[in-house]
Image: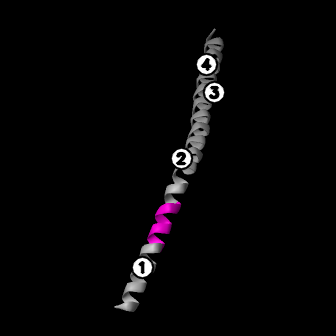
Amino acid sequence: MFLIGWIVVIVLSLVVLGAVAYGVFGALSRLGREVASFEREVRPLLEQVQATAAAAEARRDRDDAAG
């Protein structure tokens, strides 16, 4: 009877660990999709900021050369 109790405990532990692992891997998958989506949304803004910074630097260099 004691052996059956331990078997039940082990099986239940494996079921719980499997459920936790399934949840963690699902969350990691969702996180990866969210990061990719965020990058697609932010990429145009980043390119615009970089272009504006380059234009400001060129204007500053031009003004320094003229002044």
Q: CA distance from mark 1 to mark 2?
A: 32 Å
Which callout, 2 or 4, points at the residue further toward the start of the chain? 4
Q: Secondary structure at mark 3?
A: helix
Look at label 4 and name its amino acid.
Leu
Q: Quadrant of residue 16?
A: top right
Which callout, 3 or 2, points at the residue further toward the start of the chain? 3
Name the residue at the front extreme.
66
Could you tell me if the residues under marks 4 and 3 are in contact, i.e. CB atoms within 8 Å?
no
Residue 8: % across, % down: 63, 15
Name the residue at the left extreme.
67
Residue 49: % across, % down: 46, 63
Q: Secondary structure at mark 4?
A: helix
How busy is the neighbourhood of tag 4: few (under 14 within 10 Å), some, or many (20 plus)? few
Q: Which residue is mark 1?
A: 59
Image vertical order of residue 64 relative to residue 36, above or below:
below
Which callout, 1 or 3, points at the residue further toward the start of the chain? 3
* Start-end of magenta stretch: 47-54
Q: Which residue is mark 4?
A: 12
Look at label 1 and name its amino acid.
Arg
Image vertical order of residue 41 relative to residue 14, above or below:
below
